[in-house]
Image: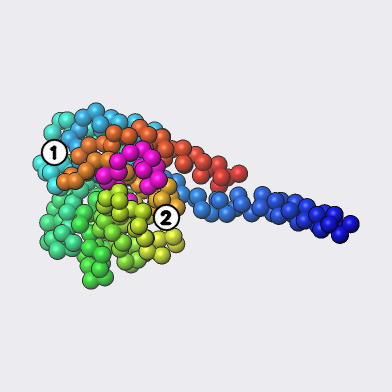
């Protein structure tokens, strides 16, 4: 009788535990997966069919594309092929931002503003990508001034900062940018990377990662999973390599887009059920 009594109590406990987990687990899962992934792609490619592939992806999930005509805006206006490519992206709903170098905050700010003005005048895009972003407090006013300047332009509602590494929180809280790229490096370095603790306190869409030299689909998927787990909303993973890992699309582009789309659908279902 003692053995049966203990068994009965254990069964009651187990039943209560299972019911409790059924209630608690969806809540925990929701908290961990409330990230809707988006693509932020350095589209350093002269317009061709690959731009069409990027445009097609925008029908499945949000895409932001960085254009880089000539390490900056280049000629104004751009040539006919570039104008057509921009129209294709824009009509598909892609957010387009123009590349501008800042040399870690040491480039003359008036020269940076001149590049911004050319994008405003000639490209009909949505914002600016400030490359070579500094990460230190002494440069915050420089990037804050640029942020205010960009956001004052009609329809320029996106400023991307690219330090390529962790950045002090003040750049995010001020803000000096709407999106900060906090990792840009090799596939082998991504698993060991640690974002700053403050990242989880902000919306995931404030942060992005760019991972290159990623050899295969399975590694790509594991890198995307890590981005989601680390509360990073924008992601781009490619098997393109240095010296310029952004001059073509990954060979697994379709699988990449479909995987992000499937994760978003799964996350949405968990969050809303």
Q: Which residue is mark 2?
A: 230
Name the foreground residue: 182 vs 176. Answer: 182
Per the image, is 221 magenta? yes
Q: Residue furthest bottom?
A: 138
* Numbered range of the magenta stretch: 209-223
Is any atom of residue 50 visible in this view? yes
The disc label shown at residue 210, or none: none
Looking at the image, how many numbered discs can be counted on the residues?
Answer: 2
**Residue closest to the eye, 8 or 181:** 8
Real-space CA distance between mark 1 and mark 2, rounded to the nearest whole angstrom:
40 Å
Side of 114 relative to 34 (left or right): left
Question: Where's residue 236, x and y in %?
Answer: 32, 44
Mark 1 vs mark 2, foreground winner is: 2
Between 62 and 17, the one nearer to me in the picture: 17
Depicted 95 relative to depicted 17: above or below: above
- The residue lying at 30 percent from left, 51 percent from top is 188
**Residue found at the far top of this picture:** 49
Q: Is residue 3 left or right of residue 144?
A: right
Disc 1 marks which residue?
77
Q: Identify the residue at horizontal 21%, vertical 54% (top origin).
A: 131
Q: Position of residue 227 (x, y in %)?
A: 40, 50
In the image, is residue 160 above or below residue 86?
below
Residue contact at pointers 1 and 2, CB within 8 angstroms: no
Residue found at x 32% / y 66%: 168
Image x and y of residue 204, in percent:
42, 53
Label 2 residue SS: loop
Q: For label 1, count other residues whose C-alpha is less than 10 Å away and answer few (under 14), some (14-19) or many (20+).
A: some
Lower sequence index among marks 1 and 2 = 1
């Amino acid at each position: 009788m003692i053995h049966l009594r203990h068994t009965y109590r254990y069964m009651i406990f187990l039943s209560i535990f299972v019911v409790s987990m059924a209630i608690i687990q969806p809540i925990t899962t929701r908290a961990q997966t409330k990230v809707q992934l988006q693509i932020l792609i350095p589209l350093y490619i002269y317009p061709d069919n690959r731009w069409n592939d990027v445009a097609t992806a925008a029908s499945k999930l949000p895409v932001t594309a960085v254009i880089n005509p000539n390490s900056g805006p280049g000629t104004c206006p751009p040539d006919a092929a570039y104008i057509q490519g921009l129209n294709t992206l824009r009509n598909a709903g892609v957010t387009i931002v123009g590349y501008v170098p800042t040399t870690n905050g040491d480039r003359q700010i008036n020269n940076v503003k001149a590049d911004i003005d050319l994008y405003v005048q000639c490209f009909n895009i949505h914002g600016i990508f400030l490359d070579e972003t500094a990460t230190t407090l002494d440069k915050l006013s420089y990037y804050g001034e640029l942020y205010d300047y960009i956001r004052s332009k009609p329809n320029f509602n996106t400023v991307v900062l690219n330090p390529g590494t962790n950045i002090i929180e003040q750049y995010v809280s001020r803000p000096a940018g709407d999106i900060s790229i906090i990792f840009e490096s090799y596939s082998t370095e991504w698993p060991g990377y640690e974002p700053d603790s403050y990242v989880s306190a902000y919306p995931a869409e404030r942060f992005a990662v760019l991972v290159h030299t990623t050899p295969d689909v399975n590694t790509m998927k594991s890198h995307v999973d890590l981005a989601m787990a680390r509360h990073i909303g924008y992601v781009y993973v490619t098997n393109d390599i240095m010296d310029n890992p952004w001059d073509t699309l990954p060979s697994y582009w379709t699988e990449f887009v479909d995987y992000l789309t499937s994760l978003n659908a799964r996350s949405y279902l968990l969050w809303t059920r």
